[in-house]
Image: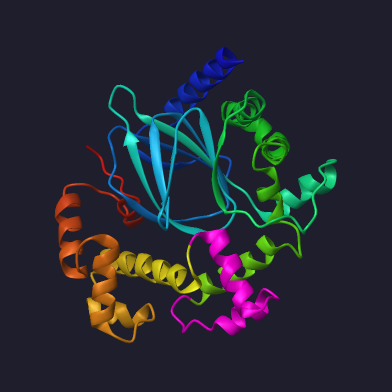
Amino acid sequence: MAEDIQVQQNELANLIERHTVQDGVIQTAIPSLFFIRYSDLTEPGYRVYKPSYCFIAQGLKEVWLAQERFEYGPADYLISSMNLPVVGQVIKASNDNPYLSLKLEVTQNQILEVLNDSEFQITAKENVKRALFVGQIESTLLDATLRLVRLLDNPKDLPYLAPIYIKEVLYRLLHGQYGVALAQIALEGSSSFRIQEGIDQIIKNFDKPLRIEELADTANMGISTFHRVFKDVTAMSPIQFQKQIRLQEARRLLISESADAADVAFRVGYESASQFSREYARMFGSPPKADIKQIKEKYEDNTLSTDQILMGSYLP
């Protein structure tokens, strides 16, 4: 079995390398499938992970969710079952052996469809799980992933077969180590499903005052229960979650628009520019002006998008 997995990993690495001509994140002809390649270590990248399945064919990466660290490589896979603000960093890569990975974004409807079409038994009353987890890769999951990726060499087959192979990948994930946690986000009435609605409200209205009572009502929970379950799922409180979303958006605005820090502070919902500066420095290591200056000096010779810079990517 170990030999089979090694063969599958090597084939996936070759396919990803062939379809990525430069470092960065590449959207494939399958809209929800992305390839990622880096020929060097990256700096920390601050992003909101969408619900997705991630697999590394070559290299190593660490991801931080609040104070929790997740490390994964070719022996593992990572799932984000909800929209989560995280910090990611490639920690093993070189020109000779670049970091090569894929990300398949998934939706609640896709998961629910697989649950309805299969004999997978799950109830909405399962204990709530963390929304980010690393599992041990299995040959059956890799085989399904390979079939999906191979389609890129046969474009005429994509419209018909890609949805089928994506369902197969989800089927394998749902029958894997963390299948119950993944299934929960698609089951109306489950704690995870209801917390996802609260998360969506925070992200949509990140620049507005946080009203816990309204979020708890959205999730059909009491306030104390909402706080507890939210932290169980995201590893942070609602206010900490909102703060990360605000600061990530502030950094994006400062880089893309060369805007004034005080103006950006108010645009993302802060009432105090000094509080914004303190919390920005706590998260990114430097106050806004110094942080953006360092970033622009570092990337001034590269033609990278704001998204690429924010992900910690750079061309060596």
Quarter-wise, where is residue 144 in the image? top right
User: What residue is at 72 percent from the left and 35 percent from the top?
Assistant: 168
Can residue 279 be found in the magenta stretch?
A: no
Whether 103 is drawn above or below 3: the answer is below
Residue at image coords 57%, 54%: 131
Relative to 66, residue 53 above or below: above
Looking at the image, how many numbered discs can be counted on the residues? 0
Q: Position of residue 290 (x, y in %)?
A: 15, 65
Tell me which residue sits at (25%, 40%) in the image. 315
Q: Quadrant of the C terminus?
A: top left
* Most frequent secondary structure within the magenta stretch: helix
Seen from the viewer's position, the closer of residues 152 and 282 is 282
Percent across and percent down for residue 114 are: 77, 45
Can residue 200 be spotted in the picture?
A: no
Q: Nearer the viewer, residue 71 or 33?
A: 71
Position of 255 with respect to 247 (left or right) is left
Q: Magenta region: which residues?
A: 206-235
Residue 221 painted magenta: yes
Task: Say left or right for 283 vs 302.
Answer: right
Relative to 65, residue 254 above or below: below
Quadrant placement of the N terminus: top right
View extreme (bottom): residue? 271
Q: Is residue 96 visible?
A: yes
Residue 45: % across, % down: 34, 51
Residue visible at 64% across and 43% down in the picture: 178
| Residue 119 horizontal/vertical position (percent) | 85, 41
